[in-house]
Image (cartoon, rainbow, N blue to C red):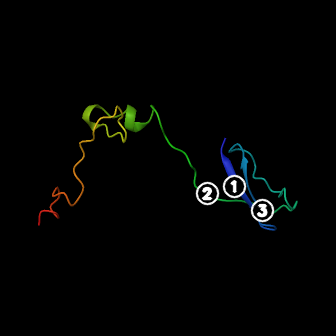
């Protein structure tokens, strides 16, 4: 279940409440008792890890572009700018 942030317009009290998405918004502030709680918009903090995601399961062969392919293998990425790898460095 997701956490939702609320702030009271009357007293400024802020809180987080774990609710189902289908639950109605909470209206009464637990600090002052006034029915002036407002649901805040906040960024969700989650990460898609493990198998079952596009990057790991649906690409085939050399088209895989997994950030941490693991196994402690060295990356074969091109050198950073300033190492003579790009046309801007060669001029």
Residue tagged 1:
5
Instruction: Give the label, 2 or 3, closer to the camera.
Output: 3
Q: In terms of depth relative to the viewer, which is nearer, 78 or 27? A: 78
> Image quadrant for the C terminus?
bottom left
Q: Is residue 19 left or right of residue 35?
A: left
Instruction: Give the label, 3 or 1, closer to the camera.
Output: 3
The residue at the far left in this view is 91
Q: Residue at x 49, y 40 (%)?
A: 48
Q: Is residue 61 left or right of residue 31?
A: left
Relative vertical location of residue 67 with respect to residue 80 in this rendering, above or below:
above
Around disc 2, counting alpha carbons within 10 Å, would you say few (fewer than 14), some (14 to 19), or many (20 or more)?
Answer: few
Whole-angstrom CA distance, mark 2 to mark 1, is: 7 Å
Q: x, y (%) of residue 67? A: 36, 42
Query: Looking at the image, do the residues carrying marks 2 and 1 touch, with CB atoms under 8 Å apart?
Result: yes
Q: Residue at x 51, y 43 (%)?
A: 47
Query: Looking at the image, do the residues carrying marks 2 and 3 touch, with CB atoms under 8 Å apart?
Result: no
Residue tagged 3:
13
Q: Quadrant of residue 14?
A: bottom right
Of mark 3 and mark 1, the one earlier in the sequence is 1
Q: x, y (%) of residue 90? A: 12, 62
Find residue 42 and name its label. 2
Of mark 2 and mark 3, the one earlier in the sequence is 3
Q: Which structural element holds mark 2?
A: loop
């Amino acid at each position: 279940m997701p956490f939702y942030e609320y702030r009271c317009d009357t007293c400024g009290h802020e809180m987080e409440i774990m609710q189902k998405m289908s639950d109605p918004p909470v209206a009464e502030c637990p600090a002052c008792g006034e029915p002036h709680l407002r649901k805040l918009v906040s960024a969700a903090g989650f990460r898609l890890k493990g198998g079952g995601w596009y990057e790991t399961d649906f690409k085939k062969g050399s088209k895989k572009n997994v950030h941490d392919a693991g196994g402690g293998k060295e990356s074969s990425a091109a050198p950073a700018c300033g190492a003579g790898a790009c046309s801007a460095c060669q001029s």
